[in-house]
Every structure is written in structure tokens, then in C-alpha cells.
Image (spheres, rainbow, N blue to C red):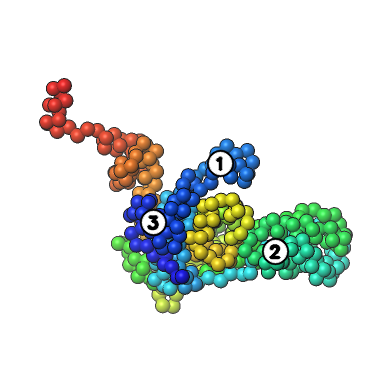
Amino acid sequence: MSRTSRIPGFYKESVESRRRLLAEAADLDGPELTRVLAGGGLDVATADKTVENVVGTYALPFSVGLNARVNDRDFLVPMVVEEPSVVAAASNAARMIREGGGFTAESDPPWMIAQVQLWEVADPRAATERVTAARDRLLALADESVPGLVARGGGGREVEVRDLGDGLFVVHILVDVQDAMGANLVNTVAERLAPEIAALAGGRVGLRILSNLCDRRCVRVRARVPAAMLATDELPGDAVRDGIVLASRFAERDPYRAATHNKGIMNGVDAVAMATGNDWRAIEAGAHAFAARRGRYEPLCTWRAGDDGSLVGSMEIPLAFGVVGGTLRVHPSARLALKLLAVRSAQELAMVAAAVGMASNLAALRALATEGIQRGHMSLHARGVAMAAGARGDEIERVAASIAEACNVTVDAARAALGRLRAPVMTPASGSADLGK
Ligand code: MEV
């Protein structure tokens, strides 16, 4: 069934009615959705079986990014993130990109790299020849070590040899991990093949582990935004487009800026990774190593003006996302997140996450190239500050509005605003009644 990721006015609804709207839009069971999300979705007993020394659980907001359309399919995107503005900004930018036809994305096959390191390889050239000649046997052994994966259509695909000098020699075994993130599978292959590789190459076995620089598992995304969609109250669309292109060029020239530019992309990617129970540290490590692959740290997403005057974005990022195994076995909210997304494969999930990363980047650059990031950010941040000052229920929005309007988003200002809000209104009648008591 085709679904829409457009739910106008969603942000204005209460949490309960958002859940109802979402259940309708994603064809999910409403009460089930409410039950799974209650208390962060993970009970302490399950958490205790997941990692060590557990004393509790730690909840974060579970939100839905709207308006995403990737390869002509709509996706309701679960996002788990603590930072105000990220979800709203990504949804807003995805709406602009939707006007230009949505994101187009493509993905490499899900190949991960197993690294087997050898020390003291005396003759690297002979080692290279022998390991290369044994390719088929090594791949067959790799397949034997992961029969379940082979049954699902994956397995060993390629053997590559790298001589790092001074007797340090590394063999990569490329493994198609299908819908898994793949770390365990690849580590199994590395450990199984290490003795064979050492026997072929000579030398001592060193590390046997995946590489998080999974550059054979990249996603490429493109998007086009009609310039008019970028206009703000103060600036026409083509001026905003040019500002975004200049911001992109700044990141392309300066690693200090590129780091922040990429952080904005990872705001979106990580939020999807967290929601779907994926290993966001692995994803972060791969993304930043890839950003530095040409010897200089570079932006993962760049923007240019297209021939028709629109803004065109392109992004390439390695993404090890899985839709089976790992956290998904135990975390009910992560399973719910996948149901909500209704992706058909790990590759499709990676393409959606990359698209959300691109939308996050566009939203940040548009704000930075126009009014600056603080106005929008602070008005959302103000809610958290109001709560920290003790505001509850309706008070939160009123205190937040008051401190945001005064451009003084501090806990002290929020306490003062709360005090004013809670002070009894003294009318002449009530004053004299009080005095009369
Ligand atoms: C904040 O989380 C992300 C930004 O700093 C990204 C950027 O500067 O492009 C706004």
C-alpha cells in the first residue's frame, strides 16, 4: 500500500492525537504503538539482558520526521534525538526537496570489510601472489563460517591485499552481509580465515576485525530544490540559494567548517540510526573517516546552483545500517521504528537515513545563510529551559514564548517569567477581599 509522509499540522497536535494520526498513516495498531512507546520502549529486565551492570534505562524523545520522499516512495521517518530543532528542520527541508521531486538515491551492495592483519611478512610480493591465487578457496572458507548468511544470499565476495610496509600486511575479505549491519558476521569471517592467510603469506597473525570505514557500502543521494522554495520573509529564493552554495564552498575549503557541516548531516543520520537500533558510533566512525579519504577532511554533502536556477545537493556517505539482528532482537521501539518506516531492505534504510541527513544539512545551511541559527533554535530550546525552571503543562509554552521573545533564554529568566505567571492577579476587589480576611 502506498503511504504519504505529509501530515499537515502534525506538530500542533497533542502527543495522543499524533499517535493516532501516525497509526492511521502507517497502518499500525494504535494501542500497540502507545504500549510499545510507553516508558521509552525498553523494560529494565530486557535492558539487563542486553548489556552489563544495568541499573535502569535512559529514555530520549521518539519523534517522526515528515515529508520524506525517496526514489518516489514516501517514508514516515522515526527519529530519536535530544536536540531541539533537528526533527522540525529536517521535516521542513524535506518538504522543500519534495517540491523538486524528492530525493533520488542509490546504494552499493551491502559489502563490509573484514581485516586480517599480519606482522613480520618477510616477502610481501610473494605473500600477495599466494593470497591472491587462493582467492576462491578463501571465499569458500568464508562462506563455510557463515552458513546462515549464505542461505540468505550473502557471503564472501572478494579478497584484497594491502602491503603497508615494514612487514605489516593486511588482507581484506569483502563480505555481502545482506540486511545485517554485519559486524559479527565479518568478525567471524576474519577469525576463521586468519590462520589460512597467515599460512599463505607467512608472518604472525595480528588483529582480525571489521573496518568501520565501509567504503564499499556507500549511499549516494541527490536532491533539487526550486529556488523559490528557499525564500524567507527577508530574502528572495535565489539569494538564499547563493548563500547556501557559498556555505557549501566554505566547508569544501575549510576542515574546521566541514566538521560542523558534517555534524549537521549526522544530526539526521544518527537520529534514524538511534530510532532503528543501529550502531551510530560505527556509522559516525565510517562517515568521518570517509570525509577524510582524500587526505583532507571534506564535507559529505555539497550544494550548487543547477542550470535551471534550482539548488542541487549531492551527498556520498558510507552507511552500515541493518534491519535484522543486534538491538532489533530486543528493543520493541526499534522494531516499531522499522514497521513505521516499512523499508524493504537495509540498503533502503540507509538511503532514507542519508536523505534525512541531507535534509538536516539543507535546513542548517538555509538558516545559517539567512537569519542565523539561533532564533529558531532558541525558541525551541526555550521549552526545555522553561521546564528546567519548573514550568509544567500549559505554563511551558507560555514561559518559553516569553523568554524567547525577550531573547533571554536562561533558567533565571524562565523562573522570573514563571513567577509572574503564577502570581495571583490582584484586582481591587480581590485585594480588598484578601485584606478583609
Ligand atoms: C547543530 O546541531 C548543527 C549545525 O551547527 C550544523 C551546521 O552548522 O551546518 C547548525
Residue closer to the observer: 128 or 24 = 24
The residue at 44%/63% (across/down) is 27
Name the residue tied to disc 3: 20
Q: CA distance from mark 3 to mark 1?
A: 27 Å
Q: CA distance from mark 1 to mark 2?
A: 31 Å
Instruction: Name the quadrant containing residue 44.
Output: top right
Instruction: Name the quadrant containing residue 432.
Output: top left
Whether residue 305 sits left or right of residue 141 in the image: it is: left
Q: Residues within 10 Å of mark 1 (few under 14, many from 20)?
A: some
The residue at 80%/53% (across/down) is 206
Name the residue tied to disc 1: 44
Residue mark closest to the camera, 3 vs 2: 3
Regarding mark 2 in the picture, which secondary structure is present there?
helix
Residue closer to the observer: 94 or 292 = 94
Whether residue 307 sits left or right of residue 287 in the image: it is: left
- Position of residue 17 relative to residue 143, above or below, is above
N-term-proximal mark, 3 vs 2: 3
The x and y percentages for residue 261 are 50, 58
State the residue lying farthest toward the bottom. Answer: 307
Name the residue tied to disc 2: 149
Mark 1 vs 2: CB contact within 8 A: no
Q: Residues within 10 Å of mark 3 (few under 14, many from 20)?
A: some
The x and y percentages for residue 387 are 38, 40
